[in-house]
Image (tube, rainbow, N blue to C red):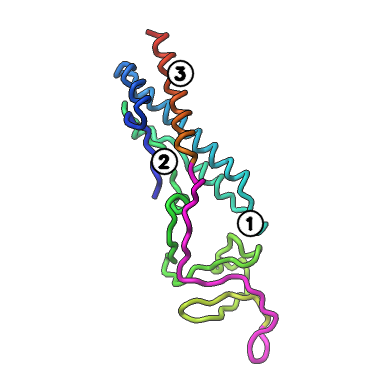
C-alpha cells in the first residue's frame, strides 16, 4: 500500500500556464523536474518531523519519520508529459494521514501495546523478553513478567496491554502544507521555463 501524490497539469492554473509555454517534446522533462522537487519537499518535511517529534515517554526512538522519508520517491516510470507521481510506500504513514483502526493480523487475536521502554518496538512472540505471563480473557488482557509462586505469581511487572484494536487519529502535520508545496513547485517550474527559453 502506498500514498500517491500527483503533480499534474491541473494542479494549479499557474503550473498549467507554464506547461503550455513549453514545447511538447520537453514537457516530460518538466514533470520529471517537478517530481524530483516534490520528492525533495516531502523528504525534507519528514526529516524535520523526525527532528521535532521526540518520543513522548522518552522511550527508545523507532525513527518513524526517517523511515517514511526513505520510502518517499519519484516514480519515474509513471511520469508523462502531464503527470509526475511521488509515492510514499508506507501503510503506517497512510494511517497518519487519514487516521485508521488497526486490527491484529497474521492470525493474532490481539494487539500488544508496550507499557515499558524495554517492550517498545518488541513483539511479545519474538522471545526478546522471556518469561512473559498472560493474564486476561478473550476480550483483552496483559502480559506481565514475574516469578511463579505457590498459588500464582508474585512481583508482576506489566509489559504489554492486549487489545482487540487501536484507533489512530489523523495527524494534521503528516504532510507539508499545500501552499508550501505549490510555492516551491511554481519556483521550480518558472526556473525550468527560463532555462528552456534561453536554449531556444
Q: Residue, x 40% and y 13% (percent of image)?
A: 196
Measuring from the top left, give residue 17's x and y in whole percent. 34, 21
Crowding at mark 2 (Cα within 10 Å: few <14, some 14-19, many 20+)? some
Side (left or right) of 75 relative to 40: left
Can you tell which of label 3 and label 2 is closer to the viewer? 3
Quarter of the image holding residue 130? bottom right
Q: Secondary structure at mark 3?
A: helix
Q: Above or below — where is 110 with respect to 57?
A: below
- The residue that disc 2 covers is 87
Camera-side residue of 29 and 150: 29
Identify which residue is drawn at 36% across, 32% down: 11
156 within the magenta span: yes
Task: Say which quadrant the C terminus sits in.
Answer: top left
The first of marks 1 and 3 along the sequence is 1
Farthest-out residue, bottom: 151
**In the image, which disc is placed on residue 56?**
1
Crowd band around label 3 with a 10 angstrom C-alpha radius: few (<14), some (14–19), many (20+) = few
Res. 80 image quadrant: top left
> 145 and 188: which one is in front?
188
Q: Which residue is mark 3?
A: 191
Q: CA distance from mark 1 to mark 3?
A: 42 Å
Residue at the location (46% across, 23% down)? 188
Q: Which residues are magenta?
A: 148-175
Residue 116 quadrant: bottom right
Residue 33: x and y in percent read: 43, 25
Which of the two discs, 1 and 2, labels the residue nearer the N terminus? Answer: 1
Q: Give how far across and how far down residue 34 sits, in percent.
A: 42, 28
* Label 1 environment density (alpha carbons within 10 Å; few <14, some 14–19, many ≥20): few
* Residue at 66%, 75% in the rendered image: 157
Whole-percent x, y for residue 142 in the image: 56, 75
Amino acid at each position: 500500500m502506498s500514498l500517491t501524490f500527483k503533480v499534474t497539469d491541473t494542479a494549479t492554473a499557474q503550473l498549467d500556464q507554464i506547461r503550455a509555454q513549453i514545447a511538447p517534446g520537453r514537457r516530460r522533462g518538466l514533470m520529471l523536474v517537478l517530481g524530483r522537487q516534490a520528492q525533495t519537499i516531502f523528504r525534507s518535511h519528514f526529516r524535520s518531523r523526525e527532528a521535532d517529534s521526540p518520543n513522548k515517554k522518552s522511550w527508545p526512538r523507532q525513527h518513524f519519520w526517517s523511515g517514511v522519508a526513505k520510502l518517499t520517491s519519484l516514480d519515474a516510470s509513471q511520469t508523462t508529459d502531464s503527470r509526475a507521481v511521488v509515492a510514499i510506500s508506507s501503510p503506517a504513514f497512510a494511517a497518519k494521514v487519514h487516521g485508521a483502526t488497526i486490527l491484529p493480523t497474521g492470525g493474532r487475536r490481539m494487539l500488544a501495546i508496550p507499557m515499558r521502554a524495554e517492550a517498545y518496538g518488541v513483539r511479545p512472540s519474538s522471545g526478546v523478553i522471556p518469561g512473559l505471563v498472560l493474564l486476561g480473557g478473550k476480550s483483552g488482557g496483559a502480559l506481565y513478567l514475574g516469578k511463579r509462586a505457590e498459588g500464582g505469581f508474585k512481583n508482576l511487572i506489566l509489559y504489554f496491554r492486549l487489545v482487540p484494536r487501536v484507533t489512530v487519529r489523523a495527524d494534521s502535520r503528516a504532510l507539508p502544507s499545500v501552499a508550501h508545496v505549490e510555492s516551491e513547485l511554481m519556483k521550480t517550474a518558472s526556473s525550468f521555463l527560463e532555462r528552456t527559453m534561453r536554449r531556444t
